[in-house]
Image: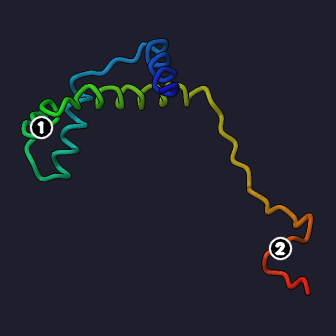
Amino acid sequence: IRAYFIVSKLIEQEKITLSDEDIDSFLKNIADNEGMAVSKIKEILEKNGQIDDIKFKLAEEKALENISKYVKIKYLEETPEKDKGGNDADSDSR
């Protein structure tokens, strides 16, 4: 729930808006993958009350794209920890 509020605030602060084309493009991708007409996909999603969820997801993606312009990600290699205590389950302690 906390993440939802954070993302909602980010969408608000970044003034993220969705165009009809954004939504139509998303629905077209679903329709193509399912082999159905866009109108049928839209009808199903509206009937199930999922259109608002899709709009939120698309707005979230746009917001993250916007902030990624300002963020620099540095990937670090993970190094294995050295065995400090010799408590390896595979070792023979007889």
Crowdedness near tag 2: few (<14), some (14–19) or many (≥20) residues, C-alpha within 10 Å: few
Image quadrant in which you'd find residue 18: top left
Q: Position of residue 65 (x, y in %)?
A: 48, 30
Q: Residue at x 23, y 32 (%)?
A: 50
Q: Which residue is drawn at 22% across and 29% down?
A: 51
Looking at the rendered image, the quarter that the C terminus falls into is bottom right
Cα–Cα gap, marks 2 and 1: 55 Å
Locate residue 90: give its quadrant: bottom right
Identify the residue under disc 2.
88
Q: Which residue lies furthest to the front in this view?
A: 94
Amino acid type indicated by mark 2: Asp
Pinpoint residue 13: horizontal percent, then vertical percent.
49, 12
Q: Kindly identify the amino acid type of the residue bearing the numbered disc 1.
A: Ile
Q: Is residue 72 left or right of residue 6?
A: right
Q: What element carries label 1?
A: helix
| Labels 2 and 1 touching (C-beta < 8 A) | no
Picture coordinates of residue 70, whole percent (x, y)? 60, 26
